[in-house]
Image (spheres, rainbow, N blue to C red):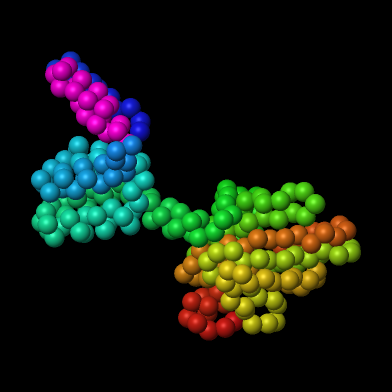
Amino acid sequence: MRKITAGRDVLGKFAPKFAQLNDDILFGEVWSRESELSARDRSLITVTALMAQGLTDTSFGHHLQMAKENGITRSEIAEILTHAAFYAGWPKAWAAFRMAKDIWADAENTDEKQLHQSSMVFPIGASNDGFAQYFSGQSYLAPVSTEQVKIFNVTFEPGCRNNWHIHEADKGGGQILICVAGRGYYQEWGKEPQELHPGDVVNIAPGVKHWHGAAPDSWFSHLAVEVPGENCRSQWCEPVSEEEYQKLKQGALL
């Protein structure tokens, strides 16, 4: 747990003993006893206790921020405050939610990303900035193998898909997709889209125009295996139109 100096920062000159007790005893000794109770669980208890007293002031905001830093997710804080509302009072919960909503404002997507990561053994990786121009939506790329056969874990946020494209080679080549998490789609030009789930494998021959990506309401990851060949390259074409893609959400096929 990070060192707390709030007492000395705010009250060091006015109430030095209180500041010392706050920083060294409360946060320095009590909060640091993580072998007895984790910092995450201490945050949960503290937030609930302060809410029950109606102390939704700046100190409550600091403890909410600390709870977030200690690993309490957006969905968890919402459930904690909802549960406590029945015991502490509805108006107190409303006041707490107003502050928590601001502190976890950027966390909805993070929670979903963490949940998706926990569903597979391969890393999500970094933002796929190098190929962003060929994707609609946010994707991520993690190298799994860069020797002998190149393998990358490609992750798509809900609604993300790549453009129509073709894998070309003078000899050999193509690509294999091995689905590892979430739900997605693969479609070849002129054919119906194929829904993909973990364990599904797609063999893509050279010269076949196709696209693949996430379902509108699900994260999706697949391993992209580059089949060895001579002078392998990709020809990127037009994006999958929004009209075509939205048919998936409605349960219709393209």
- In the rendered image, residue 38 lying in the magenta stretch gets the answer no
Residue occupying the point 26% across, 27% down: 29
- In the image, 182 versus 164, the foreground residue is 182
**Percent position of residue 145, x then y:** 71, 51
> Which picture quadrant has residue 199?
bottom right
Q: Quadrant of the N terminus?
A: top left
Determine whether 86 is above or below 99 in the image. Answer: below
The answer to whether residue 159 of the structure is visible from this angle is no
- In the image, 143 versus 130, the foreground residue is 143
The answer to whether residue 100 of the structure is visible from this angle is yes
Q: Quadrant of the C terminus?
A: bottom right
**Percent position of residue 47, x then y:** 21, 45
**Percent position of residue 171, x then y:** 89, 64
Residue occupying the point 62% across, 78% down: 194
Q: Main secondary structure of the magenta part?
A: helix
Determine whether 181 is above or below 74 in the image. Answer: below
Q: Which residues are magenta?
A: 15-34
Side of 144 where 93 appears, left or right: left
Residue occupying the point 19% across, 48% down: 48
Residue occupying the point 25% across, 47% down: 44
